[in-house]
């Protein structure tokens, strides 16, 4: 505004601002990362990124689950407790198979496959209720939340699930690459070193798993007919029906996918924390929906992308980690997270060219 | 001002004297969950650390109980700077083994406070025997003692009920398990139900009232933490059953002590969070100053105190109230 | 004192609202599956649950639902406009702690108990409007989606409540609080006395359970608030505008409604209702309680509103419907518990029964 007198500046400035508005989410992510690199002790270190990704795996997967459901105009409240159920079923199954003499690697693969098969069931029920019986997604998945919670508690009987073979822990907390100055590199296995020696751990295994899955989901949502159908269902259901899209089948598939991703997150939980419990994902529900919304999706369906949802997850994760490493006292941190997240979106909306 | 110059003087003197001299040891406290018990523990740790001239960092309090909440905070905080001593309340006996072991390997000494790794016995060789010590409360024992005290209060007969918090919290499960075992020793007593209020006082109140409605002859209720105890005694007050139904509560907050004075609660178990914290700092710092000669006991259980109407005004008991 | 004033002022429109309801009670019930379902639950549990069917039990359940009822009413207003308010649970906690802290301060300043309670409650109520004002302004002036704006406030209100209380329940408040919050209108001991607003002076506390205590203060209070809200939403211009915005913002704008201003009011009102719930909580428990993370009050409030017939896409929903939603969830828990269904089976049963009820409703549209 003040620069209006100088010819040529105004258009450039407007262009920059609207470009910033367009890419604000990513710009904000860069800004906050940069800020914490200076403001938080120890944050400017590749290790921070690994911590962030490793502990974020469940949220990333749950956010993907919510993304698909939210694009169809629904919501899935059950993902957190489906995650918990899968962490328990996975731990018990893999433990039982290994205990029965199945070689650990086979027990892990078989147990994981069975867990995913079981974990999709709640999603199939949700999808059936929503797509074929017209139950509002909120009620269907709210009820499923309770069912999964109850079943989980009944399975574990008050002691969280455990008994995974050591291989599970090695995989779950393991990294692709290790480097110990002086002792050299090694793949997948941590080198034996003396206490007090620094070992570089590079790329956690579960992060690789999540990255592969998210890449596949990106492809499915943005490059396939299935993806186009999902947007169509959320954009305008009647139009989708008229266009000959099997709306009900697509909805069923989306809710099943949601539960499948939540179960995968449950398996990741089990491997990372070598145990399973009912409320393992209870705290992640709101965060995962928030990530999708910050990524620009609408509660009413039809919009949202994988890339922006990943960015939404990262915005939250960087903020949490950064404030933590700045040593912000707990209660102040709750306030700051709220203020900063809302502030970020306020700026996005305030920038020109984003008016809706 | 005065303190720092005093410290400087001590350092200068220390430099001239023979013997072990270390810079102020850096301590990290990693609590289990955001609740009054750990807030009180922090106060004990803070006071002792200041007294011994140690530098203290308190990690963020996890929102809820569980390794998925605690470990990310622990890793982020430990990555910030180098610590000499970690005081941690493990939220899982298994999930914390590997991360704590890795932290130990980097050269940090570890004391587990309140809760433990594995079975809590660090004296025998195992994959979790690396911590210096476990300083905490025996939840199962507490539950059993609670059952015995409550049984005595109600004349060793009748129905009792447990209002617990979250079935996924191991320490709470320990209390419930111990209480069940304790009650089972009395042939004329019967446990009619265990409810879980998820740390919501409102829910505790609803559940207790439903239990009282179903079993009109309940004579005693055990509330396993602040929120469940508050909810259950208020339900009893609402039902007009004060005195007829005895309330045993875990955790001695000021509110519960006030209710005890009013006769609305009959028995309050105090853990000693502040003492646990202070002991952990004391032993940890002692060990850091002389690793070779200091033998830290592997297990320290400060035990419990029971508040009743008879001793609640005793000046010696006041230190056990959580503040 | 404060409470009495509210009750007196709002009972008048409330009673007219009752008349309106009566005339169309049948239709209202028929339109609403949740009301049928609630009725069915009450009848079923009366057979399956020992002592379920008793005035005492019903009064207790409704009394303890005061906070959820107020939160659901707040959430209804917002959901009707097509928004959502995730912050109400923690705003209630913040109001509870604020009221308690104010009362502590006032008591320390030497004020008499009555003034302490009235001023503390009023102060907290006024302050509880602020989160809503911020929510409303952020949502309307900057077009931030309600989900994000109120999720931000979710954390802010929670952090402030914890800071204020230092993580401990705020105790040491005037003893009159829980007596007021848990009192009844009628006290009757057949053959001995009938008294109002309290047992006769000198009646031993230990014998209180022999007394018939009828009509909790909380019931009068919550009924008055809900009736007033229902009336405003059903009859007034305010209500028409609210539904119009929820139906279509564009149409509402074309009709000349100041949508922004109206939405700010809606969020302020929701926040104030949450504050009212929090302040009531101090009266009910005698303690200032911050809301714990696991409470998930907002989730249950939204669930009750949806069960009560509202749609998350806006334009639909009724305060009394949401109240039925709250009672459905409460009586499901209470009835199953009294019928002896163990906790973990109960989690499952609540989910299954809820879905079955909705499915039956959808399968037989003629029931409506």
Image (cartoon, coloured by chain):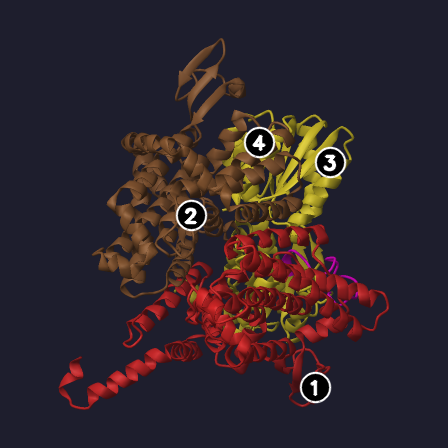
Q: Position of residue C10 (x, y in %)?
A: 29, 33
Q: Colour of chain B?
A: yellow
Secondary structure beneath dot 4 equals helix
Between B142 and A69, which is closer to the camera in this rendering?
A69
Of tags 4 and 3, which is closer to the observer? 4
- The disc label shown at residue C43, or none: 4
The span from disc 2 to disc 4 (Cα, nearest Å) is 35 Å
Question: Mark 1 touching mark 3, by CB under 8 A?
Answer: no
**Residue C114 relative to residue B186: left or right:** left
Residue B209 visible in this rendered orientation of the protein: yes
Query: Residue shown at 17%/84% (left/top)?
Result: A3
Q: Dot 4: few (<14), some (14–19), or many (≥20) neighbours within 10 Å?
A: few
Q: Which residues are magenta?
A: B112-128
> Which chain can be seen in brown?
C
Residue underneath mark 1: A187
Locate residue B4: give its quadrant. Answer: bottom left
The span from disc 4 to disc 1 (Cα, nearest Å) is 66 Å
Between B244 and C174, which is closer to the camera in this rendering?
B244
Judge whether residue B114 is colored magenta: yes
Residue underneath mark 2: C93
Q: Chain of mark 1?
A: A
Between C112 and A313, which is closer to the camera in this rendering?
A313
The span from disc 3 to disc 2 (Cα, nearest Å) is 36 Å
Q: Colour of chain A?
A: red
């Amino acid at each position: 505004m003040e620069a209006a007198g100088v010819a040529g500046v105004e258009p450039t400035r407007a262009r920059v601002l609207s470009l910033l508005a367009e890419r604000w989410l990513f710009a904000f992510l860069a800004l906050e990362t940069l800020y914490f690199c200076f403001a938080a002790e120890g944050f400017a270190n590749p290790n921070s990124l690994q911590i962030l990704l490793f502990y974020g795996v469940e949220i990333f997967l749950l956010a993907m689950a919510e993304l698909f459901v939210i694009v169809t105009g629904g919501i899935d409240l059950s993902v957190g407790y489906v995650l918990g159920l899968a962490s328990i079923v996975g731990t018990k199954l893999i433990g039982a198979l290994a205990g029965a003499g199945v070689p650990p690697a086979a027990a892990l693969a078989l147990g994981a496959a069975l867990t995913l098969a079981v974990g999709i069931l709640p999603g199939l029920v949700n999808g059936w209720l929503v797509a074929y019986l017209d139950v509002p997604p909120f009620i269907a998945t709210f009820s499923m939340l309770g069912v999964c919670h109850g079943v989980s508690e009944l399975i574990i009987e008050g002691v969280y699930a455990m008994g995974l073979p050591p291989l599970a822990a090695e995989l779950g907390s393991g990294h692709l690459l290790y480097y110990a100055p002086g002792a050299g590199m090694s793949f997948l296995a941590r080198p034996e070193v003396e206490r007090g020696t620094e070992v570089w751990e590079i790329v956690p295994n579960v992060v690789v798993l999540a990255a592969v899955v998210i890449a596949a989901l990106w492809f499915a949502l943005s490059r396939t007919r299935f993806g186009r159908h999902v947007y169509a269902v959320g954009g305008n259901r009647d139009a989708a029906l008229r266009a000959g899209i099997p709306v009900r089948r697509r909805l069923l598939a989306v809710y099943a996918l949601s539960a499948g991703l939540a179960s995968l997150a449950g398996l990741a939980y089990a491997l990372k924390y070598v145990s399973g419990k009912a409320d393992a994902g209870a705290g992640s529900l709101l965060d995962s929906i928030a990530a999708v919304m910050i990524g620009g999706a609408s509660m009413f369906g039809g919009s949202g992308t994988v890339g922006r949802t990943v960015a939404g997850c990262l915005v939250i994760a960087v903020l949490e980690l950064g404030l933590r490493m700045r040593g912000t006292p707990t209660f102040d941190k709750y306030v700051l997270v709220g203020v900063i997240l809302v502030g970020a979106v306020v700026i996005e909306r305030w920038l020109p060219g984003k008016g809706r | 001002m005065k303190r720092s110059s005093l410290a400087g003087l001590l350092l200068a003197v220390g430099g001239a004297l023979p013997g072990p001299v270390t810079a102020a040891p850096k301590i990290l406290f990693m609590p289990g969950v955001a609740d009054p018990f750990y807030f009180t523990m922090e106060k004990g740790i803070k006071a002792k650390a200041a007294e011994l001239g140690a530098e203290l960092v308190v990690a963020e309090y996890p929102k809820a109980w569980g390794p998925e909440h605690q470990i990310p905070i622990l890793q982020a905080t430990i990555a910030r700077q180098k610590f000499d001593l970690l005081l941690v309340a493990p939220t899982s006996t298994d999930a914390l083994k590997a991360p704590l072991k890795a932290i130990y390997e980097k050269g940090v000494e570890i004391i587990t406070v309140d809760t433990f790794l594995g079975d809590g016995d660090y004296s025998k060789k195992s994959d979790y025997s690396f911590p210096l010590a476990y300083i905490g409360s025996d939840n199962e024992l507490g539950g059993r003692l609670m059952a015995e005290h409550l049984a005595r209060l109600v004349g060793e007969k009748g129905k009792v009920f447990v209002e617990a918090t979250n079935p996924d919290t191991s320490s709470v499960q320990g209390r419930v398990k111990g209480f069940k075992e304790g009650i089972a020793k009395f042939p004329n007593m019967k446990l009619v139900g265990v409810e879980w209020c998820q740390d919501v006082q409102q829910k505790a109140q609803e559940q207790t009232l439903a239990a009282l409605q179903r079993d009109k002859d309940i004579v005693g209720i055990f509330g396993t933490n602040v929120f469940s105890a508050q909810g259950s005694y208020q339900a009893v007050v609402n039902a007009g059953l004060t005195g007829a139904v005895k309330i045993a509560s875990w955790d001695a907050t000021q509110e519960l002590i006030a209710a005890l004075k009013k006769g609305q609660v009959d028995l309050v178990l105090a853990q000693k969070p502040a003492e646990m914290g202070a002991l952990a700092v004391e032993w940890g710092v002692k060990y850091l100053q002389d690793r070779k000669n200091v033998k830290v006991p592997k297990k320290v259980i400060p035990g419990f105190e029971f508040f009743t109407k008879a001793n609640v005004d005793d000046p010696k008991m006041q230190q056990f109230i959580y503040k | 004192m404060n409470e009495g004033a509210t009750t007196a002022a709002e009972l008048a429109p409330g009673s007219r609202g009752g008349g309106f309801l009566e005339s169309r009670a049948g239709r209202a019930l028929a339109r609403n599956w949740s009301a049928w379902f609630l009725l069915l639950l009450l009848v079923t549990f009366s057979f399956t649950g020992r002592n379920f069917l008793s005035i005492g039990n019903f009064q207790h359940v409704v009394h303890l639902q005061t906070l959820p009822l107020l939160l659901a009413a707040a959430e209804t207003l917002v959901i009707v406009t097509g928004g959502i308010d995730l912050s109400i649970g923690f705003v209630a906690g913040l109001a509870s702690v604020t009221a308690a802290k104010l009362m502590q301060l006032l008591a320390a300043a030497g004020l008499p108990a009555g003034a302490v309670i009235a001023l503390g409650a009023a102060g907290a109520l006024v302050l509880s409007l602020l989160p809503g004002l911020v929510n409303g302004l952020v949502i309307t002036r900057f077009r931030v989606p309600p989900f994000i704006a109120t999720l931000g406030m979710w954390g802010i209100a929670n952090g402030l409540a914890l800071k204020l209380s230092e993580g401990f329940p705020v105790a040491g408040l005037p003893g009159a609080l829980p007596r007021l919050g848990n009192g009844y209108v009628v006290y009757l001991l057949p053959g001995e006395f009938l008294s109002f607003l309290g047992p006769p002076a000198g009646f031993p506390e230990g014998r209180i359970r022999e007394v018939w205590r009828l009509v909790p203060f909380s019931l009068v209070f919550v009924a008055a608030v809900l009736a007033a809200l229902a009336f405003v939403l059903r009859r007034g211009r305010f209500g028409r505008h609210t539904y119009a915005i929820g139906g279509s913002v564009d149409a509402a704008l074309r009709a000349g409604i100041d949508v922004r201003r109206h939405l700010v009011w809606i969020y302020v009102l929701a926040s104030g209702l949450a504050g009212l719930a929090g302040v009531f909580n101090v009266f009910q428990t005698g303690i200032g309680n911050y809301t714990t993370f696991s409470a998930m009050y907002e989730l249950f409030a939204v669930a009750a509103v949806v069960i009560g017939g509202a749609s998350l896409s806006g334009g639909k929903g009724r305060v009394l419907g949401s109240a039925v939603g709250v009672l459905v969830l409460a009586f499901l828990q209470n009835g199953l518990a009294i019928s002896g269904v163990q906790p973990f089976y109960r989690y499952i049963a609540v989910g299954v029964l809820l879905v079955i009820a909705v499915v039956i409703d959808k399968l037989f549209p003629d029931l409506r």
